[in-house]
Amino acid sequence: TIHTHKKRRKKSEERIETHTAINKRTFFVQRETNMRYDVVLYLSGISTLISVLLSTYLIATNFNKWKIKSTTISTNILIIVLMAPIFAIDSFVSLLELEEGEIVAHLLDMFKECYESITLHAFLMLMYSLLGLTKDMIQGKKPIPDEMKGRELHVPFPLSSFMGKDKHPKLDQKWLQKLRIWTIQFVFLRPLLSTVDILFVDHVIPLHNEHVTSIIKLIVTISLNISVTTAFCALITFYHAFEHELAPHRPLAKFICIKGVVFFTTWQGVILKLLGHFGVLHEGYRFSLDEIELAWQDLLVCMEMAFIFSPLCVYAFSNADEKVKEIELKEQKVADKEETKKTK
């Protein structure tokens, strides 16, 4: 009986020690998880603040100069410049609501996606304005300048596959309108597709049928990719045709400000999904695998907006391009004077 009692007591002590060890481990794991989450919040918050401050500085120091050129130019530049801080704020709010209902984050996501489509259209309108194309010229009420008329257009793949025999059309008013339609269709389709995605794919309106939900998600994804590809093709087509004339305005840097944001946010999300699928990322004590993937995505977006795209916007849209233009004009005047001397 004494031996049995000792045995039971020993097992009880072992259970107490095991339970204590588990509690200690759980405590440390929980504390470590909370600390990591706090670090992620601090990093994303600081990055968002940097992005907002850089964009505010750029607008405050250059808006009047943009407005002198044209109200249309200043409006379109403002739309493009605000893209980076809007993406950063959206990602930061998503991190704050990681364990909540994410209602605000969903609404901000929808606004961000719609804003992305407006930015693409604004960039095409900006290129039109920088080359002196007015609204009346685009609508066909006034003729376009002779030096622009008849310029050969190179429509990129995959849209070139649907061009038939006319692979390299000539620029006219019809093509100006067509390129505008190619971008503005994304402005209208993006909100519609985002609404369908939130209502049916995110189960705001439950369909109680996973097969139907998968089909809707597939249709939304394919439609979205076709729409955004068409919009980007319009930008590339016009930029390629007037690359030399647009060179003083740093169009490539301006285009990367838009294309880079969309490219990074889309493809790094795909890469994070693959990392989760192959076990590189895994669920933790506090967060599920989907939440961890989303947290990494949001943190990366905040940091990219602060340290890549907001500084790039400062470079692309500062008044430095005006200085380059002034230098080129001076050089051209000097060259013209030398030619006149030679002819004399």
Image (spheres, rainbow, N blue to C red):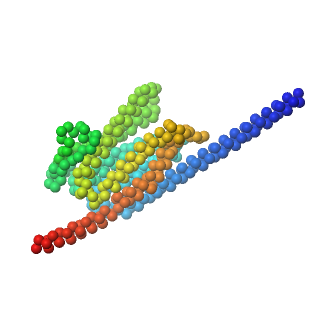
Q: In which quarter of the image is residue 251?
A: bottom left
Front-most of residues 335 and 212: 335
Q: Is residue 295 above or below residue 328?
A: above
Q: Answer yes or no: is residue 142 visible.
A: no
Q: How many marks?
A: 0
Quarter of the image for residue 331 reads bottom left
The one of 329 and 75 positioned closer to us in this rendering: 329
Quadrant where the C terminus is found in the figure = bottom left
Name the residue at 19% across, 49% down: 152
Residue at 21% x, 39% y: name it. 163
Residue 169 location, x and y as percent? 18, 45
Front residue of this view, candidates 281 and 229: 281
Identified at 33% across, 64% down, the residue is: 320
Q: Where is residue 106 in the image (x, y as percent from the top left)?
A: 45, 41
| Location of the N terminus (image quadrant) | top right
311 horizontally vs 322: left or right: right
